[in-house]
Amino acid sequence: MDNYGNNVQFQVYGTGKKSEIPVSFEEMEKLTKEKLNEASFYYIAGGAGSESSMRDNRRAFDKWKIVPRMLCDVSERDISINLFGKKYHTPVLFAPIGVQTIAHPEGELEVARAASELNIPFIASTAASFSLEKISDVLADSPKWYQLYWSSDHEIAASMVKRAEENGYEAIVVTLDTPMMGWREKDIEHAYLPFLKGEGVANYLADPVFRSRLHNAPEEDPESAILLWTRLFGNPSLTWEDLSFLRKQTKLPILLKGILHKEDAKLALEYGMDGIIVSNHGGRQVDGTISTLEALEDICNELKGKFPILVDSGIRRGSDVYKALAIGADAVLIGRPFMYGLALGGKDGVKQVMNNIIADFDLSMALSGQRKISELSASLLVKEKDGKQL
């Protein structure tokens, strides 16, 4: 993808019109807060406890400084990547986020439309407001992965993985950091959990194994279905040994999401996983965790090149993407920014947000003297400690 950033800039400048939604993440967040009701907004925007993990995710990016190189021919650039034998034209993916209908009535379907038009991998969540089949229909042949919340009923987990494979999903992302909901003060204050109202449970209601566990169909007795969901969502008893069960269910690549400790990254490799996503769930699960960028640095120092290492949490702009890739990530996942775009502008808002981040990254790379992602390395960064460069 040559000169992506320049092209997007010139297209915007050439319109002579102000952007439909703010380019700034902070302004988007402000307007989204004004548009959505408090409970919905804070479910998207909030974090665990005092939200220190959320703040530290951002501070970690600020500690790393880019050191541009000059007089490099960057007239043509390639920001494509290869993952699991497939080529993607950008290193930016849609993070799996559930219950997207709290931001827009069409939720995941609207984001899937944007993802399809952008040809950017969409990761569908188990907690989506629409079934993985409906989302797949919208995505058609565009790249798609499936994120699994591993149910305490192994047969339900296996059924969802098989459904994903049958519907053309290209990888399975297993979220490990949510065997139960984190302590989110704003959600508790608002007594708000959308699943209890039947939102975000579509994959369960459409699942044949889940339905077989009910005395009556969910259409006839939705309350009983939701009650069963509360008993089966999450699985705090999982261990590393259980991964062999999942491996038997699919031939698709399996990535473990929620890895922060270097030893867990090593275990993922040891147990035959195909990749990891370094993540603290956007600061939504455990307050006071290590930032994802700090974890990424430690993990990449030992495991870079042994299997794909992706990262999410705290990525807001193209310069953040640059820093994550330079430290060693193979790709990044975008979360809250596209949700704000969804709330403010539907499909077009999502496209604008993702295009802005990609263009910003492309320009950051070009202005720092790199033509392709393989040229990025930690040697192009310096890290500050207590305000001083190391």
Image: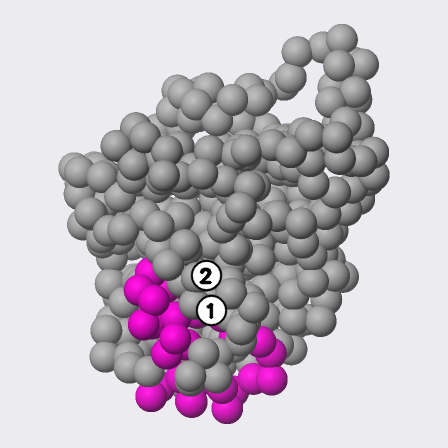
Can the viewer see residue 240?
yes
Between 301 and 167, the residue placed more toward the observer is 301
What is the distance, in whole Å, between disc 2 and disc 1 at their CAs? 5 Å
Q: Position of residue 254 (x, y in %)?
A: 52, 75
Residue located beneath label 1 in the image: 303
| Residue at point 77%, 27% (across, down) | 6
Relative to 178, residue 154 above or below: below
Q: Residues within 10 Å of mark 2 (few under 14, many from 20)?
A: some
- In this picture, residue 356 sits left or right of residue 47: right
The reply to whether callout 2 and callout 1 are in contact (CB within 8 Å) is yes
Q: Name the amino acid type tagged 2.
A: Cys
The amino acid type found where label 1 is placed reads: Leu
Colouring scheme, one of rainbow, by chain, secondary structure, one colour: one colour
Secondary element type, mark 2: helix
**Residue occupying the point 69% across, 62% down:** 82
Residue 97 tag number? none
Task: Say if 196 sits above or below 256 in the image.
Answer: above
Q: Is residue 199 left or right of residue 109?
A: left
Residue under the image location 50 percent in, 40 percent down: 381
For residue 237, side relative to residue 265 (left or right) = left
Residue 263 is covered by the magenta coloring: yes
Look at 74% across and 42% down and name the residue there. 371
- Which quadrant: the N terminus? top right
Question: Could you classify mark 1 by the number of other residues whose Cα lies within 10 Å: few (under 14), some (14-19), or many (20 or more)?
Answer: some
Q: Nearer the viewer, residue 64 or 34?
A: 64
Location of residue 211 with respect to 15 vertically, above or below: below
- The residue range painted magenta reads 241-268
Residue 368: image location, x then y, percent: 64, 33
Q: Quadrant of the C terminus?
A: top left
- Residue 123 located within the stretch drawn in magenta: no
The residue that mark 2 highlights is 300
Task: Indicate whether 44 appears above or below 124.
Answer: above
